[in-house]
Amino acid sequence: MNFIKDNLSTINASLPENVTLVAVSKTKPISDIKEAYDAGQRVFGENKIQEMVSKYEVLPKDIKWHMIGHLQRNKVKYMAHFVDLIHGVDSFKTLKEIDKQAKKHNRIIHCLLQARIAKEETKFGLPFDEIKNILNSSEFQELTNVSVVGLMGMASFTDNLDIVADEFSSLKELFDELNMQHSSLSILSMGMSGDYKIAIEKGSTMIRVGSSIFGARNYVI
Ligand SMILES: *Cc1c(COP(=O)(O)O)cnc(C)c1O
């Protein structure tokens, strides 16, 4: 009955101190989130803006809501007043829209740029060069209400853990390179249920775990 609490304790017990656990609650009911909340979890991740908004409205206000999914620019406005961190920023246009919406609420919204690390064609994310171009551009430096605090990446969906490890390493190298230049990025969001242990070995500071906490999702989205 208390499997969510048990799963959280197991995962938390294995995490290094500098790694933040985002509990990915997409498709899961309010009751499941409450159970995790009662066990002490405060950071939750959702991949659909509407779903996150409706959960935000009924749940305790000390929850930190992370948007981890692909962003539709026209929906950014619905979460701009409360979202704590946006992981999946994959274009400069989206960054500008977040900046515009954040201004309306007098907030600075923290974002991660999503890097394309998977070899597969299907994954979203920016090529490394584009990430560098964005961070170096004067247009970016003029944005006052977004703060890029790190990078996010998703590895290929494969059983070959060497490929996954290589992809995570490449993102960690980019992260270190940017920080050696001039950026002050603190968050490296990589690792999900199936690969978070490898991600942590490769330098992740934030893992996004769903099914290992809440159980398998009933449908794929
Ligand atoms: C669903 C999702 C996760 C969590 O996946 P699990 O395999 O259930 O841990 C992590 N990151 C993103 C971007 C997701 O969409």
Image: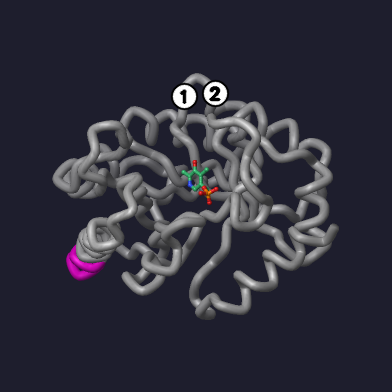
Image mark count = 2
Of the numbered discs in the image, which one, if any, rests on residue 178? none
Which element carries disc 1, helix, strand or loop? loop
Q: Tell whether position 174 is magenta.
A: no
Part of the protein shown in magenta = 176-181
Q: Main secondary structure of the magenta part?
A: helix
> What kind of residue is marked 1?
Gln
Determine the residue positioned at 69% across, 33% down: 53
Q: Is the residue indicated by label 1 positioned so its CB lies within 8 Å of ligand 1?
A: no
Residue drawn at the location 54% of the way across and 41% of the way down? 67
The residue that label 2 is drawn on is 75
* Mark 2 element type: helix
> Which of the image's four quarters has the N terminus?
bottom right
Q: CA distance from mark 2 to mark 1?
A: 6 Å
Q: Which residue is the site of mark 1?
A: 72
Q: Amino acid at mark 2?
A: Lys
* Residue 4 visible, this orientation: yes
Q: Position of residue 208 (x, y in %)?
A: 52, 54
**Few, some or many residues within 10 Å of mark 2 (<14, 14–19, 20+):** some
- Check whether the beta carbons of the residues at disc 2 and disc 1 lie within 8 A of each other: yes
On the image, the x and y values in percent for residue 132 come to: 18, 49
Q: To which quarter of the image does residue 52 belong?
A: top right
Q: Residue at x 65, y 45 (%)?
A: 25
